[in-house]
Amino acid sequence: MKRIAIFPGSFDPITKGHENILLRALPLFDEVIIAIGINSSKQSYFTLEQRENWIKQVFANEPKVRVETYTGLTINFCKKVGANYILRGLRTSTDFEFENLIAQNNKVMAPEIESVFMIPVSELSAINSTVVRDIIRNGGDPTPFIPASIKIEK
C-alpha cells in the first residue's frame, strides 16, 4: 500500500516551519499532498492562487510533493485522495491539545487513517502564519520567517 500523507493547513503564508516539517516528513511517505483548506468563514490574507504558487515554488524539486485545495472535513479529503496519514506540526502544548482532540475524532470517523505529529526544530518553533501576517501588515520584513524562494510584496 502506498503511504500517502495529507499536510493540511491554510498556509497563509507558508512559513519556514511548514517547510521544515514537510522536508523532514518526506522520507516517511511515498507522497505528501499539501492540502490548502478553504474555510468560507475565514478571510485569507493572501489569495488562494498566491498560496498555491508559493508552495509549488518551494517544493518544485520534490517529486513526492503535490499541492491541492479542498473544502470540508480534512478526513473526507483524505478518503477522496486515498491518503492514509494526516501530518501535523506541534509547536506548543496548546497545539497538542487541539490536534489531539481532532485526531481522536478523526479516528472515530476513519479508523484506517493515522495522524502523525512532528515537532519543529527549536529555532523554528515560534514561527506561525498569524505572526508572519502581522509582520507583513505592519511593514516588517518577513524574510527570516518564510522560505527563501518566496518574495512577498504586500
Image: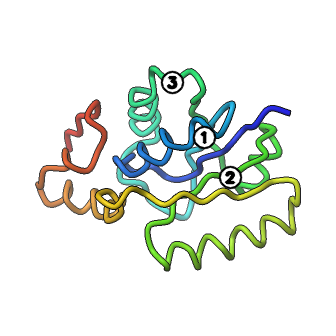
Disc 1 and disc 3: Cα gap in Å?
18 Å
Left of 29 or right of it: where is 13?
left
Point 51% across, 72% down: residue: 95
Left of 77 or right of it: where is 49?
left
Q: Between disc 1 and disc 2, whose residue precedes?
A: 1
Give percent across and percent down for residue 56.
46, 28
Q: Between disc 2 and disc 3, whose residue precedes?
A: 3
Q: According to the image, label 2 marks what residue?
A: 86
Label annotation for residue 62: 3
Point 60% across, 26% down: residue: 64
Give percent across and percent down for residue 122.
34, 61
How has the structure been colored for display?
rainbow
How many labels were placed on the picture? 3
- Whether label 1 touches label 3, CB < 8 Å: no
Closer-to-camera residue (94/129): 94
Give percent across and percent down for residue 98.
59, 75
Label annotation for residue 69: 1
Foreground tag (1 vs 2): 2
Disc 1 and disc 2: Cα gap in Å?
15 Å
Three-letter code for the amino acid on which mark 3 is drawn: Glu
Q: Quadrant of the C terminus?
A: top left
**Crowding at label 1, few (<14), some or many (≥20) Cα neighbours within 10 Å?**
some
